[in-house]
Amino acid sequence: MGQRHPSDKSQAGSLCQKRVRELIPVAGQKLLRFSALQVAAVGLLAWSLPVLPAAAIGRNSYEKCASRLLNAGIAPAAIPASCASALHPDELANCVVKINGKTDITAEEALDTCKRVRRPKELATCVVDISKQTEASMASAVLDNCRRSLLPTRYSQCVVGISRSMEVLPAQAMAACIEAGDRISEFDPSFVPQNQLPAEPTPTPPAPVTPRPSL
């Protein structure tokens, strides 16, 4: 076999470099076209998505409240005022739906009570937990006691715990726990109950002044 001349190698290298230079613009154009298509697709997708105004977003919780109460069987006439007056409409609806779905209490009774408490979520937990330990005939008493408690979750824990550990009737446990109330466990170090204050000393009248004899 004959040997290749050095000029042949240089010519081959030049042709290779030329081919590479020809391919670079083509690849760059394809990359640019692909990027442009991606940007256009993203733009079309963003343009097609609905843009909710701020007012519509603010109404979501009230809309959900009305829808859930309606599905629970609440009369349509009672729904607007109930949802509108609630500080947290979604919590109000959750309270009604949870109590109605997991106990024998009607949706109307649940709504009337859920509207009157500051912690509707805790109220629902209290009613459901205690109802598991009681009969259906005690539903009204359970609802009323959970409403009266300032800390419904703690109250339900008291009732359930005593009923289970000591085999006490739920009615007795409810009475004992509601009677104990929500006591204040911490006082200011300088605070002394009024009935423990020391009695104020009786003021001593001044001694009478004896007049001096006149000269």
Image: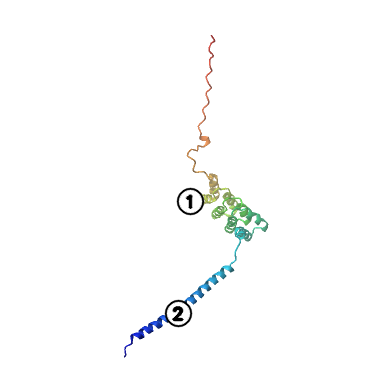
Disc 1 to disc 2, C-alpha distance: 84 Å
Camera-nearest residue between 53 and 2: 2
**Can you tell which of label 1 and label 2 is closer to the viewer?**
2
The N terminus lies in which quarter of the figure?
Answer: bottom left
Residue at the limit of the structure toward the bottom, as seen here: 1
- In what element is the residue under mark 2? helix
Q: What's the residue at 63%, 54% (across, down)?
A: 84
In the rendered structure, which amino acid carries the disc numbered 1? Ser
Question: Taking 28 as reference, is 107 above or below it?
Answer: above
Residue at the limit of the structure toward the top, as seen here: 215
In the rendered structure, which amino acid carries the disc numbered 2? Leu
Q: For mark 2, what is the residue?
A: 23
Q: What's the residue at 67%, 58% (across, down)?
A: 76
- In what element is the residue under mark 1? helix
Q: For mark 1, what is the residue?
A: 165
Residue 52: quadrant of the picture: bottom right
Q: Is residue 79 left or right of residue 208?
A: right
Residue 128 % position (x, y): 55, 55
Earlier residue among tags 1 and 2: 2
Residue 57 % position (x, y): 60, 60
Question: Taking 182 as reference, is 121 above or below it?
Answer: below
Colouring style: rainbow
Camera-nearest residue between 99 and 170: 99
Camera-nearest residue between 1 and 78: 1
Label 2: few (<14), some or many (≥20) within 10 Å? few
Q: What's the residue at 56%, 68% (across, down)?
A: 46
Camera-nearest residue between 26 and 214: 26
Residue 141 % position (x, y): 59, 50
Label 1: few (<14), some or many (≥20) within 10 Å? few
